[in-house]
């Protein structure tokens, strides 16, 4: 009788689950860990499956015994309780056997861990800096650096537009690396702790302000790999994705050369005088991707958390105070120092924009050269 | 297990003091929070809360002392108090352990990493900075400072506290012998030693904060660990001295008997605990 | 009303009126207060979980802004951990320990009252932060700096409420230790104590060892923010990771604080309904002690990704894996107790069986995470959320449900409605799995935790999980109804209540007298 009850129950549960899987047909139902594209991620996947199988087997034995006794040793079936309640032999067995199983798990785990943490000669070093809420990448020794932030339009997030295929997992400037090279990431943060994680690369490492953490990967396949910041870092922690594009050596070289020439063009134009319109145009973009997360596109901030810049005494007062606030931030608050994140032109542009937007009609023009002098 | 376990165990029926204590704590911390947030009334509210708390402490202890003197506590109750006090002291030990742990971590791990033990960190972020101890970190937080000489006031203070441990033991022996005159004298000596320690400590803080030393709570990790450890210790000495004073008065009143004097012993344990923590401080903060 | 300074332990009169509850020193009154407080907090924390699940029902931002979402996650966890589960266990300890060991009351009754009455104030302070400028704390229940230092005006109140909760727990723990060590009836030797008493004794040791450490950690946060210290600031020579070490030195024992008393409850219930003595009593005691001991050596398994040296990672990995051994011993002993018993399946037993199974599933995922190289993938994903909800909800919370059903007839003198109890059980068990099982898949597929919005690939399982969440939440209204119904009346319970029940508490009347044992019982 109880058996039939259980059967009915199981059918109900399975039916219930099936119902949902059919009902939400548009969504994916990925069940398992990804195998990934690096040796470390394969190790992790294999270990995961290995331990999973062990756990399932133990579960079958333990729950099996429990269900047998639930089904057979019940009072309604006239079971009479046995009297045994102790056995040192049994206790020893079920202490030692799990211990041996654990050793069997610990050996491959140790091997995988040693590989994952093994220092080695890198082919390429990239310094990664987590900021609220974007990533800064610097190719060490190559003079290439850029900021990488979410590029999903706000309208999609607020359900005013249909969501794109890579909703929340797309950025303006992806990280580009060559395949079959050992890439060492030197990870740190500029404000709070973040964590750099791309599941397909099999590794995540926390970005700790003031310290460098190392991790490495060696991608086996060309492609685009997406991940996210994995440590709570404030309001937009959920909106701080990572995109890594793995290219073959030649394409990677080409990309690197492009970045360098862009950079050179930028630094050349930093010396000339810019017009108000040029700066405001550029400043609006810089503001949207760097400042609006806190101070809002409307310049109104979030009361009590992020101050409004509209009508702010800093944004409408002396230029130099404004420049210093943005360059050096306000230690101990969420307002971080932008001196290292943005170049002179961007800083000049965004400050000019702030001083002339939302009715802050100061008419002030801040030139890149002024930023350079204030640094 | 004592056989008189249940029949004679004193169970008080209802008490106002705990709720007053809870309200006092709440008001005090609420005021402190407001104060930290820059509100004007904060400090007043905090003091009011503190007053309530003091009122509670006096009231509660008065009740307990009266009950004790009326002979309501049997040996088993006495034992409960002993267990209670011991584990309370243990929890205090763990509180200090957190700060000692922080000191250890900074000295053995974080400072060496910043200073080059971890090549990436030093080269990319703090190039040119070398690990030393004491330090206020690669950011020179709080500005340059110089140390206090451990062989002056701190060594003297060590001596003071150690002797106070001895005097309180003499007091205990006197109590056990029923020699009240000696008991009170030794207790007074202990209180004076404790108070002198505090006086020196305050003087030393003054020195540290002076322009000459410029060693403050804000002097990077050294200042933080130094002042938090010695500061919390000082707070405990203050508390201990107050408790010792109360016990001295009670001794003078003839409150304790040669074989029943838990109140005395509790304070003596506490005092020894404070003593031991100081030894740890002297070694790990000042000497090493 | 003033303090009674007379020696009147033998009086049998019940004080009346509201103030009775404020001034009470009676272990049963205080136990009841704790349980009511815990239930209230469970509903408040649960309501916050419902906000979380509603926002996560679909991709995109619909109901709350991201900052508030983080506040909900943070407050949900703090309230559930410090407001619901821990006080519920202390409430059970208050009610049961004196009755189980044959004592008249707790050893330090006035302090007992204080431990409780600090709680509502601490809870008020914590919940009050929701209305402060800058919003409630939003840095996660783990309060990692530097993020937590960005909290608005709520910051000092977060710290102080943690201090208050800590003071309350420490005093509660001291009281429990003293009661157990000093108030046992003659003949009640340590190795005769019911396992609930044993597990609580060990839990109390954990509490006094780690709550002060948490207090120290948050004090350092306070001084870093307001008094210029540099504990967690690299520029001053400190390290944000230092906080994590101190926090988890508290935090890992903390999770066992939330499960050991549950082990004790289940070890009381299974033998009763199997009508067979608990298998391997002494090995259960040793296993509990080993778990507690090991819990001090594993904290950094929460920090495999912070960049520890390899040797550190190996040490914490091995130590963590070891915990499976004593925990396994417990699970096996429960199964062996059921084996060849004569079982019936009243509500407390049903919850206990579900506990054994679902806790084990949670333990297995814990074991998977203990392997550092795979934890690099699991860490900070929903796989972890699934893990700890399995050990906490069908673990700790189910054990509390089981305990309430088991002892409620003793406390009130009334039987609860068995039909409704079973209904509560089946709905809870089904929906808790619908709620949390899919979160394993989400985590493996790569969904990070603590995010208000997610990529569309995670939509399906989030939808299922949310529906399970709402249904599980609504089911708990049924629990409330059953409780109220039982307190107000019902068929009278016998003193023994359950056919197979053994222990001193069942020798007292139902409901028991105001002072449990005025004359010490003889234990043979
Ligand atoms: C009641 C609470 C509770 C309990 C009991 C546990 C039990 C365990 N936990 Fe869990 N854990 C939490 C609450 C709990 N945990 C919480 C709240 C977090 C997250 C905190 C946060 O970040 O917010 C967490 C996070 C957490 C992590 C960190 C993950 C990360 O952030 O990356 C890890 C990693 O090792 C871990 C491991 C374990 C292990 C190995 C056990 C073991 O004790 C489990 C042992 C049990 C079994 C293994 C099952 C029964 C055994 C057998 C049947 C024997 C045979 C088995 C074998 C030999 C395989 N837990
Ligand atoms: C003992 C502890 C405990 C308990 C009991 C619970 C119970 C629940 N938890 Fe909790 N949870 C934690 C401890 C706990 N949790 C911790 C430590 C975290 C980590 C926080 C962090 O990351 O910092 C967390 C985080 C957490 C998350 C992840 C949030 C994030 O990462 O952003 C989620 C998401 O689903 C969640 C959901 C739930 C749900 C649905 C329940 C349910 O079981 C709750 C059911 C109860 C009720 C619902 C209340 C009763 C009913 C009513 C009030 C009636 C009204 C009902 C309706 C309107 C339907 N929890
Ligand atoms: Cu950056 Cu989360
Ligand atoms: Cu843990």
Image: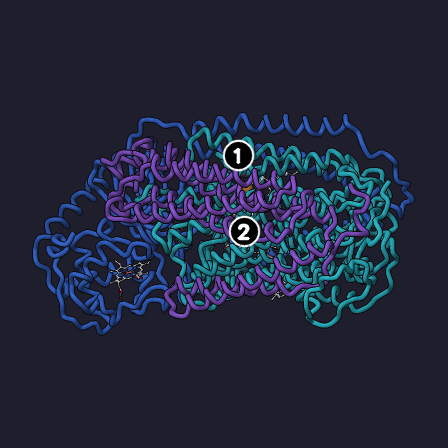
Chain colours: A blue, B purple, C cyan
Say whether residue B249 is left or right of residue B207: right
Q: Which of marks 1 and 2 is in front?
A: 2
Whether label 1 lies within 8 Å of ligand 1 gets the answer yes
Q: Which of B142 and B89 is in front in this view?
A: B89
Q: Nearer the viewer, residue C457 or C46?
A: C46
Say whether residue C136 is left or right of residue C329: left
At 30% from the left and 39% from the top, the residue drawn is: B147
The residue furthest left is A272
Label 2 Cα crowd, 10 Å radius (few <14 / some 14-19 / many 20+): many
The quarter of the rendered structure image containing the C terminus of chain C is top right
User: Disc 1 designates what residue?
Assistant: C371
Q: What element carries label 2?
A: helix
Q: How far from the left and from the top, in percent, is residue C486?
A: 79, 65
Say whether residue A150 is left or right of residue C142: left
Q: How far from the left and from the top, in percent, is residue B173?
A: 61, 38
User: Disc 2 designates what residue?
Assistant: B243
The quarter of the rendered structure image containing the N terminus of chain C is bottom right
Kindly indicate the quadrant of the structure image that contains residue A264: top left
Q: Which of C507 and B247 is in front in this view?
A: B247
The correct choice, above or below, for C276 with respect to A375 in the image is above
Judge whether residue A197 can be spotted in this image.
no
């Amino acid at each position: 009788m109880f058996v039939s009850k259980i059967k009915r129950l199981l059918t109900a549960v399975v039916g219930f689950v099936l119902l949902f899987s059919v009902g939400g047909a548009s969504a994916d139902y990925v069940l398992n860990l990804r195998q990934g594209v690096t040796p470390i991620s394969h190790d992790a996947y294999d270990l995961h499956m290995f331990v999973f199988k062990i756990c399932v087997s133990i579960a079958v034995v333990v729950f099996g015994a429990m269900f047998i006794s639930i089904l057979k040793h019940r009072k309604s079936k006239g079971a009479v309780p046995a009297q045994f309640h102790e056995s040192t032999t049994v206790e020893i067995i079920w202490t030692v056997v799990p211990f041996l199983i654990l050793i069997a798990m610990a050996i491959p785990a140790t091997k995988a861990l040693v590989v994952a943490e093994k220092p080695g000669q890198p082919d390429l070093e990239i310094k990664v800096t987590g900021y609220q809420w974007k990533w800064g990448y610097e190719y060490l020794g190559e003079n290439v650096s850029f900021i990488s932030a979410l590029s999903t339009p706000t309208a999609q997030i607020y359900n005013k537009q249909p969501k794109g295929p890579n909703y929340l997992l797309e950025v303006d400037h992806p990280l580009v690396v060559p395949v079959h090279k050992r890439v060492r990431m030197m990870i740190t943060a500029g404000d709070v702790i973040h964590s750099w994680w791309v599941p397909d690369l099999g590794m995540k490492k926390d970005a700790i302000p003031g310290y460098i953490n190392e991790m490495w990967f060696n991608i086996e396949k060309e492609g685009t790999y997406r991940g996210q910041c994995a440590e709570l870092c404030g309001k937009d922690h959920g909106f701080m994705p990572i995109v890594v594009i793995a290219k073959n050596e030649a394409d990677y070289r080409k990309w690197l050369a492009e970045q360098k020439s862009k950079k050179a063009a930028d630094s050349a134009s930093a010396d000339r005088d810019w017009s108000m319109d040029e700066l405001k145009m550029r400043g609006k973009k810089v503001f949207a991707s760097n400042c609006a997360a806190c101070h809002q596109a409307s310049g109104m901030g979030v009361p009590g958390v992020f101050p409004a810049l509209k009508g702010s005494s800093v944004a409408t007062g002396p230029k130099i105070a404004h420049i210093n606030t943005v360059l050096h931030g306000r230690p101990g608050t969420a307002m971080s120092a932008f001196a290292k994140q943005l170049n002179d032109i961007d800083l000049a542009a965004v400050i000019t924009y702030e001083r002339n937007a939302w009715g802050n009609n100061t008419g002030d023009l801040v030139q890149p050269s002024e930023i350079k002098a204030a640094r | 297990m004592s056989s008189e376990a249940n029949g004679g165990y004193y169970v008080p029926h209802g008490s106002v003091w705990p709720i007053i204590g809870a309200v006092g704590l709440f008001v005090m911390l609420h005021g402190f929070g407001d104060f930290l947030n820059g509100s004007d009334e904060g400090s007043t509210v905090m003091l009011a809360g503190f007053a309530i708390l003091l009122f509670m402490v006096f009231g509660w202890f008065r009740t307990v002392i009266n009950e004790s003197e009326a002979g309501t506590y049997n040996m088993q109750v006495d034992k409960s108090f002993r267990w209670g006090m011991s584990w309370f002291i243990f929890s205090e030990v763990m509180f200090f352990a957190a700060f000692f742990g922080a000191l250890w971590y900074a000295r053995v791990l974080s400072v060496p990493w910043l200073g080059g033990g971890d090549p990436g960190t030093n080269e990319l972020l703090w190039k040119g900075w070398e690990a030393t101890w004491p330090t206020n970190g690669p950011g020179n937080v709080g500005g340059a400072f110089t140390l206090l000489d451990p062989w002056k006031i701190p060594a003297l203070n060590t001596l003071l506290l150690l002797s106070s441990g001895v005097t309180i033991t003499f007091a205990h022996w006197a109590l056990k012998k029923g020699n009240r005159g000696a008991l009170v004298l030794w207790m007074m000596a202990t209180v004076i030693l404790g108070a002198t320690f505090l006086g020196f400590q305050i003087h030393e803080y003054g020195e540290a904060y002076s322009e000459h030393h410029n060693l403050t709570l804000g002097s990077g990790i050294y200042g933080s660990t130094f002042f938090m450890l010695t500061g919390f210790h000082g707070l405990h000495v203050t508390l201990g001295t107050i408790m010792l004073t109360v016990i001295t008065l009670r001794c003078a009143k003839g409150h304790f008997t040669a074989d029943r004097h838990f109140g005395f012993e509790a304070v003596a344990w506490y005092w020894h605990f404070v003593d031991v923590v100081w030894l740890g401080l002297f070694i790990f903060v000042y000497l090493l | 009303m003033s303090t009674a300074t007379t020696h009147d332990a033998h009086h049998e009169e019940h004080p009346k009126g509201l103030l009775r509850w404020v001034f009470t020193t009676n272990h049963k009154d205080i136990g009841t207060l704790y349980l009511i407080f815990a239930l209230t907090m469970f509903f408040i924390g649960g309501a916050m979980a419902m906000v979380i699940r509603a926002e996560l029902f679909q991709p995109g931002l619909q109901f709350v802004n991201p900052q508030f979402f983080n506040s909900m996650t943070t407050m949900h966890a703090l309230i559930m951990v410090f407001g619901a589960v821990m006080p519920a266990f202390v409430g059970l300890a208050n009610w049961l320990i004196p009755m189980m060991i044959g004592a008249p009351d707790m050893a330090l009754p006035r302090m007992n009252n204080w431990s409780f009455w600090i709680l509502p104030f601490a809870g008020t302070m914590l919940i009050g932060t929701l209305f402060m400028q800058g919003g409630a704390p939003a840095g996660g229940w783990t309060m990692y700096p530097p993020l937590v230092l960005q909290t608005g005006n709520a910051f000092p109140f977060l710290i102080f409420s943690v201090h208050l909760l800590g003071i309350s727990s420490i005093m509660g723990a001291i009281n429990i230790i003293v009661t157990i060590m000093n108030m046992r009836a003659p003949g009640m030797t340590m190795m005769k104590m019911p396992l609930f008493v044993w597990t609580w004794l060990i839990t109390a040791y954990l509490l006094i060892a780690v709550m002060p450490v948490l207090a120290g950690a948050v004090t350092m946060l306070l001084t870093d923010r307001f008094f210029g210290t540099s504990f967690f600031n690299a520029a001053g020579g400190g390290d944000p990771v230092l906080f994590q070490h101190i926090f988890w030195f508290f935090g890992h024992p903390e999770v066992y604080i939330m499960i050991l008393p549950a082990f004790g409850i289940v070890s009381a219930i299974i033998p009763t309904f199997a009508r067979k003595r608990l298998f391997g009593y002494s090995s259960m005691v040793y296993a509990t002690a080993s778990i507690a001991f090991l819990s001090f050596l594993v904290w950094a398994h929460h920090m495999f990704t912070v960049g520890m040296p390899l040797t550190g990672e190996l040490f914490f990995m091995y130590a963590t894996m070891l915990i499976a051994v004593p925990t396994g011993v417990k699970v096996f002993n429960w199964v062996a107790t059921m084996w060849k018993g004569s079982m019936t399946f009243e509500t407390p037993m049903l919850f206990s069986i579900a506990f054994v199974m679902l806790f084990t599933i949670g333990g297995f995922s814990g074991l998977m995470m203990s392997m550092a190289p795979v934890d690099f993938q699991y860490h900070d994903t929903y796989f972890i959320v699934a893990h700890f909800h399995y050990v906490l909800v069908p673990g700790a919370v189910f054990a509390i449900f089981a305990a309430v059903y088991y002892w409620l007839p003793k406390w009130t003198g009334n039987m609860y409605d068995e039909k409704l109890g079973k209904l509560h059980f089946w709905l809870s068990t089904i929906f808790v799995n619908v709620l949390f099982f899919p979160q394993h898949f989400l985590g493996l597929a790569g969904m990070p935790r603590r995010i208000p919005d997610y990529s569309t690939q995670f939509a399906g399982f989030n939808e299922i999980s949310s529906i399970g969440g709402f249904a599980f939440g609504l089911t708990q209204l049924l629990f409330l109804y059953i409780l109220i119904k039982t307190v107000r009346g019902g068929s009278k319970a016998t003193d023994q209540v359950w056919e197979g029940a053994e222990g001193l508490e069942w020798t007292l009347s139902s409901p028991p007298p105001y002072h449990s044992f005025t004359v010490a019982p003889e234990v043979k």
